[in-house]
Amino acid sequence: MASGSDQARAEEFEIKAEKKINGWSFFGSKYEDATDLYEKAANSYKLAKNWDKAGSVYVKLAACHLKLDSKHDAASAYVNAFNSYKKISIPEAAPYLSQAVNIFMEMGRLNMAARYYKELGEIYEQEENLEKAIDFLERAADLFQSEEVTTSANQCKQKIAQMAAELEQYPKAVEIFEGIARQNINNNLLKYSVKGILLNAGLCQLCRGDVVAITNSLEKYQELDPTFSGTREQRFLADLAASAEEEDVSKFTDIIKEFDSMTRLDKWKTTLLLRAKNALKAKEDEEDDLT
């Protein structure tokens, strides 16, 4: 349990810091003195679990570091402000992490900026604000790519593709998945992941409802990865495409059940398959109404 004395100590340090800043001194040493006091105040507010006050003091600390042209310390203070505020409200906290990222970008610390963009993307994903999540993850992927951190760039891209599909932006999702597959096929460590990525791309094609596009894609995927032919993933997509063309909902459902009994389908794939099945059922019902 945090004691009231932590809160009182924090307030005392903060008041002393304010006095230093508002006082008179030579050569900006007042900001140096204030940073030490703000640091102590923020730590005491954290011990008192007063996250709102801890966050506000870290913002003041960042301003002092900027006055002293200590950019890295300022960015770190903004990160600490974000970590404090996010315990209360993610939307209120996010701008402070963005400010830290801007400073890291100015300093050319692109890898660090990318990591925090990725964190922001994942936070907005948890908040189910997929548009914002995609925006930050795209920035992260670009920076990781420029720094040649390919694995992290691909992690971001896969998340972007999955969220784009959730938002029914299927062409965008397909393009990203296919791009990752083309990249991974030439990498001895990553080429074994290609069949799973192509399965994801194929499921997005399925949700577009264009059976010809799915068939063409399957041919293209077998050219991209000759080992894809005859895999369970390839047969699964081919069987789904055939049952969709026949507009046979029960067959479509049986194919999914059979695949799931061997390889458990995750939530994302299940969502897409359910959408495709519902679209197929709606088409079947419409034709029944016409007869």
Image: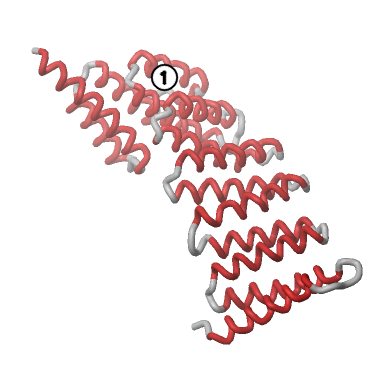
The quadrant in which residue 28 appears is bottom right
Q: Position of residue 269 (x, y in %)?
A: 36, 37
The quadrant in which residue 240 appears is top left
Determine whether 262 is above or below 55 in the image.
above
Q: Position of residue 72 (x, y in %)?
A: 76, 57
Q: Position of residue 19 (x, y in %)?
A: 75, 76
Which residue is found at the position 48% from the left and 63% from the top?
Answer: 88
Between 255 and 118, the one lying in front of the other is 118
Residue found at the very far right of the displayed protein: 26
Q: Which residue is mark 1?
A: 218
Between 102 and 110, the one lying in front of the other is 102
Position of 194 with respect to 75 (left or right) is left
Position of 283 with respect to 275 (left or right) is left
Q: Secondary structure at mark 1?
A: helix
**Image quadrant where one finds the C terminus:** top left
The quadrant in which residue 275 appears is top left
Which residue is found at the position 63% from the left and 63% from the top?
Answer: 80
Q: Residue flagged by tag 1: what amino acid is it?
A: Leu
Which residue is found at the position 45% from the left and 41% from the top?
Answer: 130
Position of 209 with respect to 63 (left or right) is left
Q: Position of residue 241 (x, y in %)?
A: 31, 21
Q: How is the image coloured?
A: secondary structure
Determine whether 248 is above or below 180 in the image.
above
Position of 208 with respect to 80 (left or right) is left
Determine whether 39 is above or below 185 in the image.
below
Determine whether 25 is above or below 68 in the image.
below
Residue found at the very far left of the displayed protein: 291
Q: How many marks?
A: 1
- Disc 1 crowd, CA 10 A, few/some/many (<14, 14-19, 20+): many
